Image: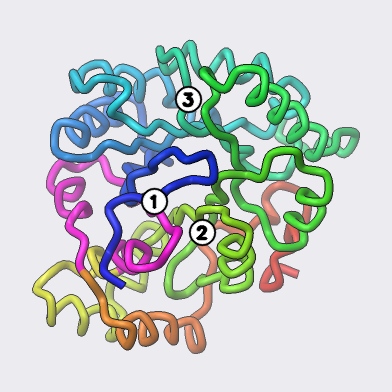
Amino acid sequence: MPATTSVTLNTGAVMPTVGLGTWKSKPGQVEYAVEFALKNGYTHIDTAAGYQNETEVGQGIKASGLPREQIFLTTKLDNPDQRHPEKALEASLKKLDTPYLDLWLMHWPAPMTRDGKPDMGHDWLDTWKTMEDLHLAHPEKLKAIGVSNFSVEYFERLLKVARVVPAVNQIELHPSCPQDDVVEYCQNKGIVLTAYSPLGSDNSPLLKNETVTKIAAKYRVQPANVLISLHANKPMHTVLPKSVTNERILNNAKIIDLTPEEIGELHDIDKTHHFRACHPSWTGFGGLGFPDCK
């Protein structure tokens, strides 16, 4: 299929395929990156309370001069806020200086205490129920809700009781972590996938992978463009390249059409070189149901 420029969520909202990711993008840099991206064709920005840069992201949005309704803005509920989603939502809206969110995700199905320990006394499913309440009561303020880092096992539990099917599941996706089981499950349920770490993290070995560099040479683009474009060439996928460098922000937006054979070659990388940049065990809840993390 030719690469998409947008996908449609189960709410009917349109989400641009390529967004600027802001994980590890520090205050003092991220506001300028957001401003530059929005002034140069991006209309989708992704942040999180846990990134501790929502205020600066909001400043970048304002500085861009782009009307708010032309921007798709995602943020995420932080793990230590799972007992108080309503308070956390208001805090995010205030920091981002916006009247509404296009998408609000549960960052991990892993409630935590303020000192970063697992909060075993709280169930993430109760947090989701409150997120549903907030969305259903205030659809103008919270246009869509979704999840992040959800495995098929966790989805099975969620969808048994969900009143609102998550609009999005944001997960690590790249040729060395294709997560075919999660992708297929979400596509069958009408849930859009957002790929984070599409390059396979900082200084990724994927940028030097022979298959990637061969395809990049054919299309006369950077290896990063091949890895980002992979997701834009799949149905119901969006992707979040991240950078605070103007040149890379511009370059990352160049999407190419890939052939089915090239997509297959990129997928085959996982057979000999599997890795995850962000293993869920850091949460204290083990592998969170992901088969390669058990």
Q: Nearer the viewer, mark 3 or mark 1?
A: 1
Note whether 190 is above or below 269 in the view shown.
above
10 Å neighbourhood of mark 3: few (<14), some, or many (≥20)?
Answer: many
As measured in the structure, the alpha-carbon distance from the residue carrying label 1 to the one carrying label 2 is 19 Å
Identify residue type, mark 3: Leu
| In-front residue for pair 283/17 | 17
The quarter of the picture where the C terminus appears is bottom right
The residue carrying mark 2 is 172
> Is residue 228 within the magenta segment?
yes
Task: Provide the residue span drawn in magenta.
Answer: 227-256
10 Å neighbourhood of mark 2: few (<14), some, or many (≥20)?
Answer: many
> Is residue 157 within the magenta segment?
no
Q: If you read the primary sequence from the N terminus, does the residue marked by circle 3 or circle 1 appear first?
A: 1
The quarter of the picture where the N terminus appears is bottom left
10 Å neighbourhood of mark 1: few (<14), some, or many (≥20)?
Answer: some
Residue 101: give its label: 3
